[in-house]
Amino acid sequence: MPRTSHNYAQKTPHVAPSAPTALAEKVLAGLRRRPKQLPSAYFYDEEGSRLFRRIMALPEYYVTRAESEILTTHAVRIAAACASRRVTLVDLGAGDGTKTSVLLESLAVACTELVYAPVDICAEALTELEVAHARRHPQIPVASFVGDYAEGLAAVGKRFQDHVRVALFLGSNLGNLPPEEALALLGTWRRALRPGDLLLLGLDLMKDPELLQAAYDDAEGVTAAFNLNLLVRMNRELGADFDPSSFRHYARFDPRRNAMESYLVSTRDQLVRVGGECIGFAAWEAIQTEMSCKYRESDVEAFARTVGLSPVAWFYDSRRWFLDALLRAE
């Protein structure tokens, strides 16, 4: 069990494009499309993050509880895949690190040396995570990286060349991409991994569409508020003049691509000014704000093998609603 207290945190300065400029470009590009779209990556301003924490606690929203159950129940088995080895746990989009914390405890026992390497594009989020990690696991050194996930995987690999990398991408985030984009992303990550490195991938499995519908359109209306907050953010950060009361949250399951889709639907004809441009909406015209693909095990195995990853083990919650797939780079 590692006992070093050295802090390997990478303090690379984070230089991002002007947030309003980047946001305006992506928003306008999406609103010019047919059908219109808004980037779901921008759900998470301060209010959006607060609302999502409420969503995770809702009885209808099973995803967080299911994956937490998997990690709590199977952490020792997951850690056994790299027992007696030097390991860097690369946490891609770590959030507050709560779910990862359970796995770190088991890895610390199983591995001869362990480094925790959270990767995120937001330097402020990583700073908060480092503080929380030092409180929870002071014996496990941290090597955070500010940048995109592929860059982080590659940088951590160069820095700890004698370590096996165990990359985490939890929470069914892969499902927010269309299948072709998800496959391309996995391929990018595979190229950043060395043979023998591991990826633990969270995936929401196909289930009764009524369960899915309830999870994305809850009775309290928290998900609706979360979706509509996108418009509030556009108004605040881009000087737009959306009237959120003239849009309605709508969620549906698309059986053709096994995906939940969320929309904001204009309830009337209207013109909205965004970043100096005037965008027209017809009554009942929709803006797609999110897609969340649901998978079968056969889909996951096909994805993995296509990009050079081989299945090591499947870990399920007790209802088999969610899967954490452990994959090895070949």
Image (spheres, rainbow, N blue to C red):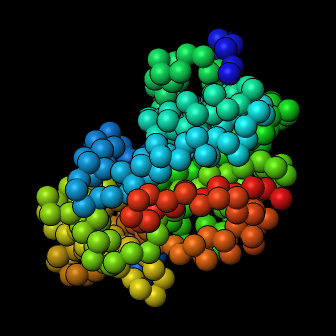
Q: In the figure, 4 relative to 228: above or below?
A: above
Q: In the figure, 101 relative to 270: above or below?
A: above
- Residue nearer the viewer, 10 or 218: 218
Q: Residue at x 39, y 75 (%)?
A: 207
Instruction: State which quarter of the image contains the N terminus.
Output: top right
Q: Residue at x 55, y 16 (%)?
A: 138
Q: Residue at x 67, y 52 (%)?
A: 199
Residue 111 x/y as whole percent = 71, 31
Residue 64 x/y as whole percent = 38, 51
- Residue nearer the viewer, 309 or 237: 309
Residue pushed farthest bottom?
A: 256
Judge from the rendering whether residue 97 lies leftward or rightward of residue 193; answer left or right.
left
- Residue nearer the viewer, 12 or 177: 177
Determine if residue 143 is in view: no
Determine if residue 290 is in view: yes
Q: Residue at x 15, y 63 (%)?
A: 219
Residue 265, quarter of the rendered image: bottom left
